[in-house]
Image: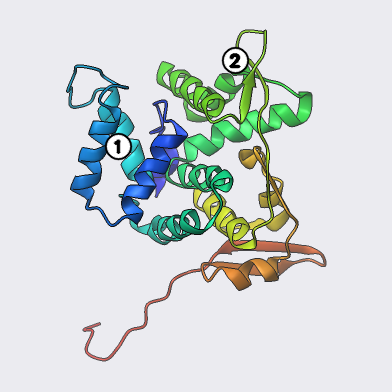
Amino acid sequence: MTNRLTQIGFSQRIRLEWLERTANLVLAGNSETSIYRALQELLEDKLSIGGNAKRGTREKAITILMKIWVRASGEIHSLQNHGLKLLSILPREKHIAVHWGMAMAVYPFWGAVAAQVGRLLRLQGTAAASQVQRRMREHYGERDTVSRAARRVLRNFVDWGVLKETSGKGIYTQGISRTINHVELIAWLAEAFLHAHPNGSVALRTVLDSTSLFPFDLSPISADHLVAVSERLDTLRHGLDQDLIMLRKVTQSVTKGDGL
């Protein structure tokens, strides 16, 4: 878990339609090998054209796509499965929220960049790439790779339509915003947020108002309602009026003969 939280990982431009295609291949029951081949074919004329370098741009993009929708680590496997279910039942315009949440859970760097962008948009109505990159270097280290990765994530935000470029170089404004009132999706996004910020418990209001979810307006919901629709979330009342939510700990029953 620690490695996932501290690594950059998401360092390529990933189009929304590529994530949609990957998820659809999983939903259709394709094997991992078949999905890999299909993605190679999909991206053959888009990335690393004419090349087959083992760690070229195309291979790195496929790795990201596969980690998000095919090869989820054990701790977020249930989140991935539920996300695929949501993609199968939600209207297409809501799919961006599912891809966003899964990207954030698998690659917390994505959510960290989003949090800085959302904070700046909330404060001043615009977000400068230089400001975002500076904050990311403060958190992840003074490395050129951090600045480059942050720049590519910002480009993804533009490609996905959630940010718009302005006449000023490297200055962005808010793009599309989606209202999310589907209770199951809100609960799932809360779970994705917790996987990207595993600090035990967090106030429900913090999740609903999180700048890392800046493209989405999550409808108000009670903590009790949230945990009623998600068996992987738990709640705790803190003080008189603050509800905390957390990931529910999975307990494994031990039967006789297990050899403890």
At 77% from the left edge and 23% from the top edge, which residue is drawn? 124
Answer above or below: position of 21 versus 188.
Answer: above
The picture quadrant where one finds residue 219 is bottom right
User: Which numbered tag is attached to residue 63?
Assistant: 1
The picture quadrant where one finds residue 229 is bottom right
The picture quadrant where one finds residue 132 is top right
User: Which numbered tag is attached to residue 160?
Assistant: none
> From the viewer's perspective, is 195 left or right of 260?
right
CA gap between label 1 and label 2 equals 28 Å
Q: Position of residue 185 (x, y in %)?
A: 58, 57
Instruction: Give the farthest residue toward the right.
Output: 240
Q: What element does badge 1 sit on?
A: helix
At 30% from the left edge and 35% from the top edge, which residue is drawn? 62
Answer above or below: position of 94 versus 260.
Answer: above
The image's colour scheme reads rainbow
Mark 1 vs mark 2: give the one in front.
1
Q: Which residue is mark 2?
A: 130
